Amino acid sequence: MYDFLLVGTGLFNAVFAYEAHKKGKKCMAVEKRDHIGGNCYTEEINRINVHKYGAHIFHTSDKFVWNYIQQFAEFNNFINSPIANYHGEIYNLPFNMNTFSKMWGIRTPEEARRIIDRQRKQITGEATNLEEHAISQVGTDVYEKLIKGYTEKQWGRPCSELPKSIMRRIPVRYTYDNNYYNDTYQGIPVDGYTQIFDKMFSGCDIFLNTDFNENKDELRKEAKRIIYTGTIDSYYNYCFGPLEYRSLRFETEVLDIDNYQGVAVVNYTDRETPYTRIIEHKHFEFGKQDTTVISREYPSEWDLGKEAYYPINDEKNSERYRKYAELAAKETGVFFGGRLGLYQYFDMQDTIKAALELADKII
Ligand SMILES: Cc1cc2nc3c(=O)[nH]c(=O)nc-3n(C[C@H](O)[C@H](O)[C@H](O)COP(=O)(O)OP(=O)(O)OC[C@H]3O[C@@H](n4cnc5c(N)ncnc54)[C@H](O)[C@@H]3O)c2cc1C
């Protein structure tokens, strides 16, 4: 008999498995996909590590987390500096002096501030939707060219019909700084993410192509306790109805050229281009290969058969989640973790911290 049955082999359970093994506990893991690593999984194509479930850039300001992850891989000094393409016009992201200089032909922070402040004043009173909220923070030009189309593609609805809650404070920098994240530490594992999972799970028995929910009765007999990182509603057979997500679809292409877009991430911010981003994977590791691999990222409606990417934390779904969480709180040997188990978006650093916390508490 195992001490723990881990459902899912993403980052949450990888950290848990590593900590359990260190303390002499026996774990088995079941994974419904045909590989470990969850959404962080990278696959090698033409010697390029391809981020199969979307671009993953590790970033944190927590020195403990940074040191922790580096036990499993060497990280390079990649800094995420994405580009926006609006009908062929190129802008730097996040919104900073490089963006403003290109947009208005200005040079100083004072000039940029004056323009943005003037445009922001179009919204008087409390913003009632995402469109008004965005304009009240960054003005009309940045909104029209860099936010509107992108956001509408992502959520499949006009910004004027989206709640302002899905976009909190929009960061605006009055410095010439294209570093997307504000964190102290940032990088990409040299040779991809999958090696990290091979090491973390090395002391654990893994069964791929195995869906816990289709084999519940036998699997429960295998261990005293379960760490479940699948969707919480599936565990309870959707008894309160399914929790909703936004999904993504990736179209990956190998090109016989060495450099397609000169940067890892380009956001297509107009409404007409059907995809939101193109990722050119080799640039995450400063690759010098003769060919290149790109992935176009298409936002997509979600239904039960599709990959669940972003939880929709609106009122209806939050209420539904609360009901599932109440059932979960009554369980004795089952613990829910990770982004699907807790129905919340977590960066990798948050996932590591949450898994270490649970490991500390129950191992
Ligand atoms: C598009 C995208 C981009 C991201 N980019 C970044 C980034 O740049 N930086 C960053 O820090 N974070 C990023 N993240 C977040 C990061 O992916 C998560 O923090 C991390 O993957 C969470 O790990 P997890 O173990 O909770 O979930 P997952 O990685 O989703 O792992 C869950 C695993 O459980 C398996 N599973 C589910 N149900 C069952 C079942 N019933 N039976 C068996 N197995 C099951 C799944 O197949 C999956 O392998 C991104 C997320 C997305 C969606």
Image: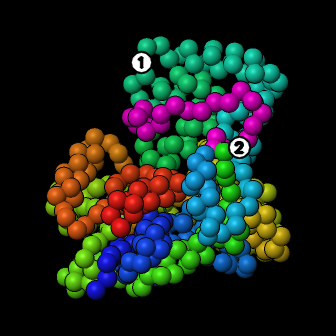
Locate residue 106, reporting x and y percent.
80, 23
Q: Quadrant of residue 255?
A: bottom right
Instruction: Judge whether 253 appears above or below 188 on screen.
Output: below
Task: Pick whichever, 179 or 124, lies toward us.
Answer: 179
* x, y percent for residue 211: 32, 79
Q: Residue at x 25, y 51 (%)?
A: 321
Residue identified by numbered label 2: 179
Q: Which residue is mark 1?
A: 126
Q: Main secondary structure of the magenta part?
A: loop
Q: Nearer the viewer, residue 297 or 288?
A: 288
Any part of residue 84 in sight = no
Left or right of residue 219: residue 276: right
Label 1 amino acid?
Glu
Q: Nearer the viewer, mark 1 or mark 2?
A: 2
Where residue 57 appears, as percent x and y from the top left, is: 62, 57
Task: Give the vertical position of 97 relative to 323 (above or below).
Answer: above
Helix, strand or loop at label 2? It is loop
Q: Local crowd at mark 1 within 10 Å, few (<14), some, or many (≥20)? A: few
**C-beta proximity under 8 Å, tags 1 and 2:** no
Where does residue 85 sit, x and y in percent of width and height? 69, 46
Would residue 206 be found to the left or right of residue 342 on screen? right
Q: Nearer the viewer, residue 267 or 335?
A: 335
The residue shown at (56%, 14%) is 121
Q: State yes or no: Cβ of the residue under disc 2 lies below 8 Å from any atom of ligand 1.
A: no
Residue shown at 39%/25% (left/top)? Answer: 128
What is the basis of the colouring in this image? Answer: rainbow
Q: What is the magenta range?
A: 159-183
The quadrant of the rendering that contains the C terminus is bottom left
